[in-house]
Each structure stands twice: as C-alpha cells, then as structure tokens.
Image (cartoon, helix red, strand yellow):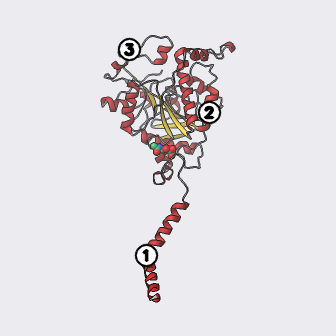
Amino acid sequence: MLRNQGIQASGIWVQYRLYIIFAIVVILIFGFLPRSNDHGVGLLHSSSSASPREQAANSTLGFEKLIALSPRPSWRTRGLKAAADLVGLDFHVPIQPHNPEELVTAFEQIGKDQGKKGPGHGSARAWLAHLDMLKYVIAQGYETAFIVEDDVDFDVRLKDQIRLISDNVREFTFATDRTPYGIDWDVLWLGHCGSAIEDSMPPTLKYRDETRCKTELYSGWSKHFLRDKLEEDHRLVQTSMQTVCTFGYGVTRKGAQKVLELLGTGGNEAYDVSMGSFCRSEQLRCIVVNPQIMNHYEPPKDAGYLSPVHVGDGQGAAADDSSFETKMGTTGNIMQSARCKALFNDVCMRPPSEM
Ligand SMILES: *[C@@H]1O[C@H](CO)[C@@H](O)[C@H](O)[C@H]1NC(C)=O
C-alpha cells in the first residue's frame, strides 16, 4: 500500500512537473524583471521598448505630456482638436489660471526703471500664462513636456517629420540614452516664426525632409536665411539664433525650471523675444529645427480677426469668435495644414512674403 501511494505520488509529480517548472520559471521572470515606471505604465505597454523615433511618433510626440495653452474653449481649441484627431495626437488642456490686472500691470513695469522695454498689456498677460504653464509642468513633475499655443497648426505629415527630428536631434546632442530627443537641452523649439542661420554659430546638422515648406513659398523675416544658407528639401538642427514666436516648444524638467527663473524676471517686449535672448546668450540651451514644423493658424483677415495679444495691447477689438469657424483662414509655412484638412478638406497656405 505504502509503496503504491509512493508510486502514485511520484506519478503526479511526473505528470505535472512540466507545469510546475513552467510556473516557477514564469514567477522568476516576472518577479525579477525591472518594474515599470511609477506612472503606472504597464510592462507590456512600456514605451521604452520602442525605438526613440517611434516613441517620438506617439500621441504625445515622445514627450511625457503634450499641453495646449488656452484661456478658454474657442475656434482655436476646436480646430486644434480636429487637427490632433486627424494626425493622432493627444493634447491636454490644463485650466489656465486668470491673473489679476494688478499682477499683469506690475509685471509690465519690471525693469523699466533700468531702461528695459517692458511688454504691452496683452503681451504681459500671455507671458504670465506661459510662466503659469511652466509652473504646472514643474508641479506635475513631468520629465519632459511640449507646450503649444492653442492656435498652433502643423502638417498632416507631422509624424513623419517628428521621426526625422528625433533621429537628428539625438545625433546633434550625441544622445546615448533611448529617449526620443536625448535630454541635453532646456528648450526644443519646433514651432516658431523664424530663426537666423549665421556663419559664426555653433555646428549645425542638416537633414533631408521633403515635406518641408519650399523656400519660395515661405513667409517670414528669416526667409533670406533659407534662401542663402539652406538648400531646398532640407531642415537644419541648430542652436537658437534670434528665434521668435513660441508656437510650440518642448522643455525638460530642469529646462522648465530654468526658463521660469530667467523669463520670470520680465523686462523685455514679449515672452518669445525674452526666450530668444536667453537662448542667444546661452543661459538656456535651446535647440531649433529650422524651418519650423509648427506655425499658427490665422482666421481670414476680412472676418475681423485680431489676436488676443493685440486686443490686450489696445490695438482694437476682435470680432465675435464664432464667425471664424465657417470660413477658412491660412497657416504660413506648412504645406498641408492639418487644421484646414480636418475642417475644410483643403490646403490653406499663407501667401509667401519676405516679412
Ligand atoms: C510617448 O513617449 C514618451 C517617451 O517615451 C512617454 O513618456 C509618453 O508617456 C508616451 N505617450 C503615451 C501616450 O504613451
């Protein structure tokens, strides 16, 4: 009897040992695999297994968060949503705190006693909104974030463009990690309205991108730099030189804090101008992709459009927002606007100009 039981018991072991060994192996593998990060991204969905360029093409463009700066829902945010859905982006629109007039006015005055040119009222309000956004990014503890203004626009081929930007920014910064853009920068300035290309500037990296705006179709003050210093169908990764307009820019965790500390001191015409000057003086490490991949969309002029900054600066009053929704406007320097494709199934490039 005893012998028999012994035989039966070992029979069960023989019968099930493969399952038992398999179970032990599974427990060991999952027990010792590194834990996914503390943001709750599951092991199987962890993006770190994707290549840097494929991370860059995810719904937050390879940043931890993609954020739109917006005072309130309007044609701007609705158009942005349509464009984002079309190309597969996921924007987060945090509630923007309303700053009191006194704070805005006080900010305008900073540095005036030292002869600095302060911002106009609307520019000061927009400036403070950017600072509030940086505080939000810092408080959330994001590793990286990309901030856009809510009238931003981009090409329907944005994901192709961003893969190339990932490849080339990584090369430009000698990145050895597996992040989409490395982390050796404070500001990654992808949406702007022009950047200079100077002979004396630090080394640049040129790459081919056939989706970029043709030089003859470009509109903006920096057009002659494209004509004289960069061949057709190419973009340049470069250090920021006189870059203006903050349509879209990435910040690293430490970059957000540095920008806040430097630009929080006011004393310049506008947020973008101040950013450009701290980039130029190399107090900020700013990487620019030139020409830009993001630009602002503007409703048709004859619909009475005036930007909130200009209204705030006292240059007039804007027409009722809703009148802009049915008439197509323009976006400069973007060959195939995602907004116009999504909203009007059309292209809407602003006519070329030297300004
Ligand atoms: C996109 O990639 C970045 C970098 O890997 C990551 O931090 C972010 O969470 C990803 N976005 C989504 C929606 O998974």
Above or below, 179 against 135 in this view is below
Within 8 Å of ligand 1, the CB of disc 2? no
Q: Work out whether residue 170 or residue 45 is closer to the camera in this orientation and state it.
A: 45
Q: Secondary structure at mark 1?
A: helix
Q: Are marks 3 and 2 in contact (CB under 8 Å)?
A: no
- The amino acid marked with disc number 1 is Tyr
Select label 2 or label 1 by which is in front.
1
Mark 1, residue position:
16
- Res. 163 in view: no
Q: Quadrant of residue 335?
A: top left
Mark 3, residue position:
319
**Label 2: few (<14), some (14–19) or many (≥20) C-alpha neighbours in 10 Å:** some
Q: Position of residue 205 (x, y in %)?
A: 55, 40
Q: Quadrant of the N terminus?
A: bottom left
Mark 3 or 1, nearer chain start: 1
Q: Position of residue 204 (x, y in %)?
A: 58, 38
Mark 2, residue position:
257
Question: Distance of mark 3 from mark 1, alpha carbons?
Answer: 77 Å
Select label 3 or label 1 by which is in front.
1
Q: Are marks 3 and 1 in contact (CB under 8 Å)?
A: no
Mark 3 or 2, nearer chain start: 2
> Relative to residue 112, is residue 251 drawn left or right?
left
Above or below, 111 against 17 in this view is above
Within 8 Å of ligand 1, the CB of disc 1? no
| Residue found at x 46% / y 54% | 44
Q: Position of residue 199 (x, y in %)?
A: 60, 32
